[in-house]
Amino acid sequence: MPWRSTARSTRRFRPRDAVEVLRASFLYLSHRRGLQRFVTRQRLTASLAHRFVAGDRLDDAVQAVTKLNRRGWSASLDHLGENVSEEKAARVATDDYLAAFERIASERLNANVSVKLTQLGLDISPDLCQELLARILQRAQQLDNFVRIDMEGSAYTQRTLDLVLALHQRYPNCGVVLQSYLYRTVDDVARANEAKVRVRLVKGAYHEPPEVAFPKKADVDAKFAEEMQQLLLHGDYPAFATHDDRLIEATKQFAHERHIPLDRFEFQMLYGIRRDLQVRLLREGYRVRIYVPYGTEWYPYLMRRLAERPANLLFLIRSMIRERRAA
């Protein structure tokens, strides 16, 4: 029998609705610390995480980056962790990032580093965070390397941008991430371009209220495309971090139409996601950097990756089936 509208149901439940429900659920779960303790003890889930995370240790990340470099990709290392509540933890994270830069230099890797400010104590003290970030930037500068400041939830957007712009005057080897799903991002792109701060443009992976972020994917995509054009025209070596084929094609087409050389920008993608697309872009001559996370604090990262691309859940389901059959 064909579907018919009734008083109780005014429209069909579409696949897109199911995707949005899954996305919201994963974003909610990314904040549940109690569930995190349970999930991280499960062997199967840890196995899934290691598809998207290079490993628990810096050695694992270095090994992954070495393989990526051999195949032509550059990388950005991210030591997972955020929202630390103790100064000791923030200083330990700083030492970990400094160690990463030393390994990049000693191994002669084509890689830089991404950091989160809440991992450096932003929730504890802005002064502490600035002190630790300056240490990282200074050592990276000595080693002729680059630091990307990751963007977190909208509560941190202004503080993050202000700190990056202030330190950029002393350390031009730092850049920032901007999220196209925030209403404010068009203005932030203009501000970063004016200051010659390098931008990585992303759609955004945090659960934000409609008061600060576009709730519809179509609007997010449209803003990404608008901001991409401004970054290509006026930005300093922008990076476009997306696995969306349409936005990638739009970026390529705009760069071609405006005669923007391929060495003036790069695409960035996540470790373990859309490897086919990573290969294709590299073969077409584009610069591609792979974001390589590592560390034991992988749970929030994994939940956000599943929220961004619920199809990744299929990998988990297939893994569960294979493991049950092997048991």
Image (spheres, helix red, strand yellow):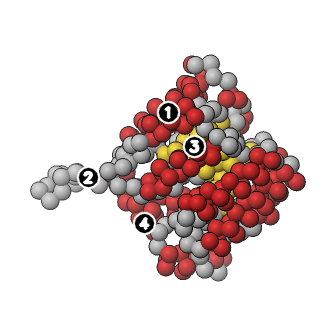
Q: Position of residue 147 (x, y in %)?
A: 68, 48
Closer to the eye: label 3 or 4: 3
Any part of residue 105 in sight: yes
Element at label 1: helix
Residue to which mark 4 is pinned: 28
**Position above or below: 52 against 204:** below
Closer to the eye: label 2 or 3: 3
Q: Earlier in the sequence, mark 2 or mark 3?
A: 2
Q: Earlier in the sequence, mark 4 or mark 2?
A: 2
Element at label 4: helix
Mark 1 and 4 residues: CB-CB less than 8 Å, in contact? Answer: no
Q: Is residue 206 left or right of residue 286?
A: left
Name the amino acid, label 2. Arg
Real-space CA distance between mark 4 and mark 2, rounded to the nearest whole angstrom: 25 Å
Real-space CA distance between mark 2 and mark 3, rounded to the nearest whole angstrom: 48 Å
Real-space CA distance between mark 3 and mark 4, rounded to the nearest whole angstrom: 31 Å
**Label 4 crowd bin: few (<14), some (14–19), many (20+), radius 10 Å:** some
| Residue 12's disc number | 2
Closer to the eye: label 1 or 3: 3
Point out the image quarter for the N terminus: bottom left
Single out the residue that lies furthest toward the left.
7
| Residue 190's disc number | 1
Residue to which mark 3 is pinned: 165
Real-space CA distance between mark 1 and mark 3, rounded to the nearest whole angstrom: 13 Å
